[in-house]
Image (cartoon, rainbow, N blue to C red):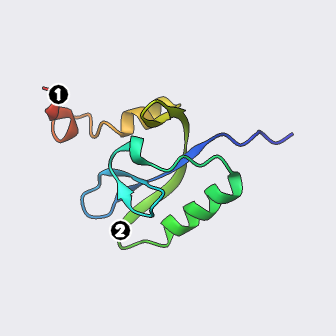
Amino acid sequence: MPRAFTPKVVTANALIEGDVIYLSADNSWTRDLAEAELLTDEAHAQLRLLEAEQQPGEVVGAYLADAQAGNAGPEPTHFREDFRRTGPSNYFHGKQAVGQ
């Protein structure tokens, strides 16, 4: 039996900077997961992923990531996505340096 569809967000990496980015409802890319469009319909999620993949001048490696509704917007449901949104882990820079 197929697994039930769970909510997703479209995520990728910005082509030039390499930052983790998310597709928002207004078709723009954001670096803040809370601003991403939470997709609850499987067909719509697949369509949004196709739209993202048709932007090779802006993004690389687009895919659907599991998410859930949170108080301030979508939140990750898997450790990998929670880890990705904090940036590289080899030393503190970028988003990680802000909290230091």
Looking at the picture, how far across and down is residue 71, in whole percent? 46, 30
**Residue at screen point 45% across, 64% down:** 27
Which residue type carries mark 2? Glu
Identity of the residue furthest to the right in this view: 1
Element on which disc 2 rests? loop
Looking at the picture, how far across and down is residue 7, in whole percent? 61, 42
Find disc 2 in the rendering and name its residue: 58
Mark 2 vs mark 1, CA separation in Å: 28 Å
Identity of the residue furthest to the top in this view: 100
Foreground residue, 32 or 53? 32
Would you say 91 lies left or right of 2 here? left
- Relative height, residue 6 to residue 70 (above, below): below
**Residue 45 placement: quadrant:** bottom right
**Residue 59 placement: quadrant:** bottom left
- The crowd level at tag 2 (other Cα within 10 Å; few <14, some 14-19, many 20+) is some
Find disc 1 in the rendering and name its residue: 99
Q: Which mark is residue 68?
A: none
**Residue at screen point 48% across, 57% down:** 25
Foreground residue, 58 or 91? 58
Q: Nearer the N terminus, badge 2 or badge 1?
A: 2
- Relative height, residue 51 to residue 6 (above, below): below
- The crowd level at tag 1 (other Cα within 10 Å; few <14, some 14-19, many 20+) is few
Q: Is residue 91 visible?
A: no
Looking at the picture, how far across and down is residue 12, in whole percent? 42, 55
Which residue type carries mark 1? Gly
Element on which disc 1 rests? loop
